[in-house]
Image (cartoon, grey):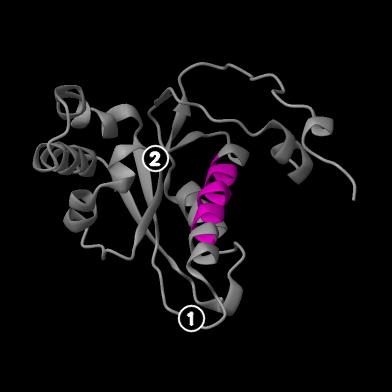
Amino acid sequence: MDAIELLLTRQSDPRLIAPGPNDDQLSIIKQAALRVPDHGCIAPWQFIVVEGEGRERLGEIYHQSAIAEQQDEKVINRAKELPLRAPMIIIAIAKYQAHPKVPRVEQVQSAGCAVLAMQQAAFAQGLGGVWRTGYFAQSDAVKGALSLTREDEIVGYLYLGTPAVDCKKSVRHSPEHFFTNL
């Protein structure tokens, strides 16, 4: 797949099954994450790869966090199942570092770019992925369980695997609705 085809056909695949990335594919995915824009070369990221039994451990972290933060029953009951939606999850974290020239927003954006780069690397290798956030990306209890600081931000959970269905998505937007000239 060439770069233009990748950019114009990449899509999110929310229904993912095994197999997930193999070691060689994961190596490429990791390398792609580290090639994103990084003002100041401060590498403001951390990534946690979750697979196998780690998915159950993450589900337990979600479950305990939902209870501790008194979420509604629907969130609590569903928490353990969420990480089982794909064979692999990569948790992407912006590790904020005070810097005179690199504001927090740029560091978070860099971590977000890493998520997109990893998803594109997976897609280019025939895998599927979906970037999820939601309540558990904002949970202080989840951050604590993952040994993150208050300043750290979970920018997303990248679910990776093989698309369960081959469903090519149509183009949703037209450029003339979003681009203007000055």
- Residue 118 is labelled as none
Quarter residue 175 falls in: top right
Judge left or right: residue 131 versus residue 167.
left
Q: State whether residue 135 is above or below residue 32.
A: above
Q: Secondary structure at mark 2?
A: loop
Question: Which residue is situated farthest in the right direction here?
Answer: 182
Q: Residue 173: x percent and y percent?
A: 73, 26
Q: CA distance from mark 2 to mark 1?
A: 26 Å
- Assess whether mark 1 and mark 2 are in contact (beta carbons under 8 angstroms): no
Q: Amino acid at mark 1?
A: His
Front of the two marks 2 and 1: 1
Dot 1 corresponds to which residue?
99
The region drawn magenta spans 110-122
Q: State whether residue 150 is above or below residue 81.
A: below
Circle 1 residues within 10 Å: few <14, some 14–19, many ≥20: few
Q: Secondary structure at mark 1?
A: loop
Q: Main secondary structure of the magenta part?
A: helix
Judge left or right: residue 60 versus residue 178.
left
Judge left or right: residue 71 versus residue 99.
left
Q: Earlier in the sequence, mark 2 or mark 1?
A: 1
Q: State whether residue 170 is above or below residue 48.
A: above
Q: Amino acid at mark 2?
A: Thr
Q: Residue 78: x percent and y percent?
A: 21, 25
Quarter residue 9 falls in: top right
Q: Residue 97: x percent and y percent?
A: 41, 75
181 or 58: nearer the viewer: 181
16 or 142: nearer the viewer: 142
Q: Residue 42: x percent and y percent?
A: 50, 77
Dot 2 corresponds to which residue?
133
139 or 120: nearer the viewer: 139
